[in-house]
Image: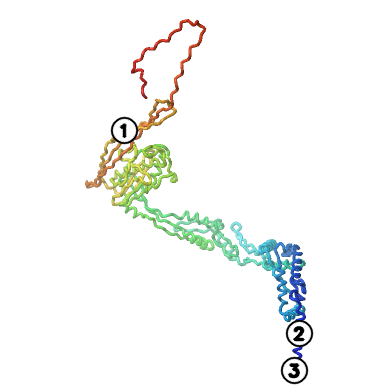
């Protein structure tokens, strides 16, 4: 036991001394060390780093040939930004053989006997690698082709599947980086190419091919209630969607189907139509309401598809939904609009713009309905009258003067409507006369409007609805108010048009006319006023309304143009000519003018 212990101890001491003696310097790499396949054992760390970097730089611009799919591609490390981390690899190799002296010695013995290889980490330009691999793949790849169905006229043909080859991009990227990071340049490097199988085979399309041929075998009848529509084979062929993109089913759809469906829906769909009123000879009648019809588009296309793919049941029954109108025929009949309540006609003319505005605003109030107890507002019904809504320039009264403005002629309609409500005996809440007297309107019964402040408002004081209708003729406008005839008696007293002052006078200086001359350019009129009293009686003779409307019209000025141009001065008389007559020759004396009367000699005043 003692001899065994001594032997073991001796061996331990010997190993310790040996490993200590072989530990070497920590600034040198252990013998047997290779980095990136290059022998660097025994070299100083800094020297090894410089040597590796130098060798790497010497091959950075030397291309390597990569082979894929029978094509060759030359690529350099510098193109992909391949940069091995040599300094880090040297440090990692040194750390693997480092430690306290005995441990370092053992590690170095191991490296000498078994070798120590370190591969450096490699930095690259990822975008450059992706671009290069994609360029190679674009030249190499031959994608697989799925089996397909092709329509030729009204026939269906099956095209066979075909396998392809594609570059394994991930493995190819790793191989290229490893090869370019190496310190040596060998022969071509083969990149991995794999077989690409088709997703759909001809056998998998057999069912779709049979369905497509059935769809094109005969027309389809589309039924909407009692109505029938024929869908011919050529139209079905346009709407037929054959399988693609890995699908194995045929169907009806696509742009052609959507176009057909839109046209078909246009012939089937109809919006609900409210009951309306139609003027007839001697009165007015109700136009019955109409129920709306709406095609169920998605269900219609599905029904056509089912019928097309059926060898026997080739009728597609299409569902529709109905929608009720807002005002039914019964609702309209209950409104009590059975005859004329009030009517009035005015004559009009003027510029094309004025004629256009009269027709436009008459259309805006045409068909207005007024509920029992509700108020009719001219401004609320027509809205703002401006150029954006189609109104044109025409003569209009602005600040008491006749000028051109947007909407001239609107007051022709408001005045006619006012008189229709006046004759109907309705309650008139707001009415304003024009600033100037207009002779072709009934005296004291004109009504001007201006959005939004000057309005014409009347109230439906009957128990049934009122309907306003307008009729524009070549030179006349008629407004009828329909409802249940009230048989009211209307009596009117109109005061004469009274003069309220002198005619205004307006002077215009004209420097093109001589002083003292004057021209009357426009004859004016004095301010005037009138009033209209209306008494409305019920059929039983009781008084319902006794209302007086006062109207005041400003005067129109007489416009006089007066000359301000100075008159020219009179020319001086010419001197008598000088003759050779003797100085004492008798000269004729000018005649003495007769004396003028003092009154005649005075200068008249302008």
Sequence-earlier tag: 3 or 1: 3
Mark 1 crowdedness (10 Å alpha carbons): few <14, some 14-19, many ≥20:
few
Q: Which labelled disc corresponds to residue 289?
A: none
Q: Which labelled disc corresponds to residue 502?
A: 1
Way the structure is coloured: rainbow
Q: Position of residue 141 (x, y in %)?
A: 68, 63
For label 1, the SS is: loop
Sequence-earlier tag: 1 or 2: 2
Q: Is residue 464 above or below residue 313?
A: above
Residue most extreme to the front = 584
Q: Is residue 3 above or below residue 532?
A: below
Q: Position of residue 68 (x, y in %)?
A: 72, 65
In the foreground, 180 or 543 = 180
Res. 64 in view: no
For label 2, the SS is: helix
Residue tagged 2: 15
Q: Is residue 262 above or below residue 3?
A: above
In whole angstroms, how far apart are the C-alphas of marks 1 and 2?
Answer: 143 Å
Residue most extreme to the left = 541
Q: Quadrant of the C terminus?
A: top left
In the foreground, 368 or 239 = 368
Q: Is residue 586 left or right of residue 174?
A: left
Residue tagged 3: 2
């Amino acid at each position: 036991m003692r001899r065994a212990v001594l032997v073991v101890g001796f061996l331990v001491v010997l190993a310790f001394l040996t490993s200590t003696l072989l530990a070497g310097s920590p600034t040198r790499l252990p013998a047997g060390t290779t980095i990136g396949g290059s022998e660097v054992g025994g070299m100083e760390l800094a020297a090894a780093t410089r040597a590796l970097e130098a060798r790497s730089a010497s091959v950075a611009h030397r291309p390597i040939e990569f082979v894929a799919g029978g094509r060759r591609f030359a690529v350099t490390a510098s193109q992909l930004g391949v940069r091995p981390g040599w300094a880090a690899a040297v440090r990692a190799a040194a750390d693997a053989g480092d430690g306290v002296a005995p441990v370092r010695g053992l590690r170095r013995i191991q490296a000498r006997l078994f070798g120590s290889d370190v591969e450096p980490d490699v930095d690259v330009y990822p975008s450059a690698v992706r671009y290069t691999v994609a360029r190679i793949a674009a030249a190499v790849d031959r994608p697989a082709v799925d089996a397909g169905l092709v329509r030729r006229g009204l026939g269906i043909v099956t095209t066979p599947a075909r396998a392809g080859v594609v570059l394994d991009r991930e493995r190819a990227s790793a191989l290229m980086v490893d090869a370019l990071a190496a310190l040596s340049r060998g022969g071509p490097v083969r990149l991995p190419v794999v077989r690409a199988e088709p997703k759909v085979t001809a056998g998998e399309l057999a069912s779709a091919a049979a369905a497509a041929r059935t769809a094109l075998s005969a027309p389809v009848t589309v039924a909407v209630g009692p109505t029938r529509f024929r869908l011919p084979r050529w139209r079905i062929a346009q709407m037929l969607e054959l399988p693609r993109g890995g699908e194995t089913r045929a169907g009806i759809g696509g742009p052609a189907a959507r176009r057909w469906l839109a046209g078909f829906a246009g012939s089937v769909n109809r919006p609900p139509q409210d009951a309306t009123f139609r003027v007839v000879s001697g009165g007015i009648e109700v136009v019955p309401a109409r129920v709306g019809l709406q095609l169920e588009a998605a269900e219609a296309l599905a029904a056509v598809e089912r019928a097309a793919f059926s060898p026997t049941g080739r009728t597609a029954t299409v569902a529709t939904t109905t929608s009720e109108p807002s005002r039914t025929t019964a609702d309209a009949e209950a409104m009590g609009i059975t005859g004329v309540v009030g009517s009035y006609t005015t004559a009009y003319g003027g510029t094309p713009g004025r004629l256009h505005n009269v027709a436009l605003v008459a259309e805006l109030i045409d068909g207005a309905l007024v509920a029992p107890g509700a108020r009719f507002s001219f401004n609320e019904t027509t809205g703002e009258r401006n150029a954006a809504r189609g109104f044109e320039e025409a003569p209009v009264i602005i600040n008491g003067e006749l000028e051109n403005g947007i909407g001239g002629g609107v007051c022709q309609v408001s005045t006619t409507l006012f008189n229709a409500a006046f004759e109907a005996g309705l309650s008139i809440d707001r009415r304003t006369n024009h600033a100037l007297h207009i002779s072709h309107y009934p005296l004291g019964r004109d009504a001007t409007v201006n959005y939004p402040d000057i309005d014409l408002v009347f109230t439906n004081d009957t128990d049934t609805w009122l309907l306003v209708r307008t009729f524009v003729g070549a030179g006349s406008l008629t407004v009828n108010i329909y409802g249940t005839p009230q048989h009211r008696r209307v009596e009117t007293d109109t005061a004469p048009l009274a003069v309220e002052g002198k005619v205004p006078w307006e002077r215009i200086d004209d420097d093109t006319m001589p002083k003292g001359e004057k021209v009357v350019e426009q004859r004016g009129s004095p301010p005037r006023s009138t009033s209209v009293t209306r008494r409305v009686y019920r059929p039983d003779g009781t008084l319902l309304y006794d209302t007086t409307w006062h109207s005041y019209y400003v005067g129109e000025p007489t416009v006089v143009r007066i000359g301000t141009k100075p008159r020219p001065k009179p020319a001086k008389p010419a001197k008598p000519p000088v003759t050779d007559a003797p100085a004492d020759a008798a000269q004729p004396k000018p005649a003495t003018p007769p004396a003028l009367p003092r009154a005649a000699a005075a200068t008249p005043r302008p």
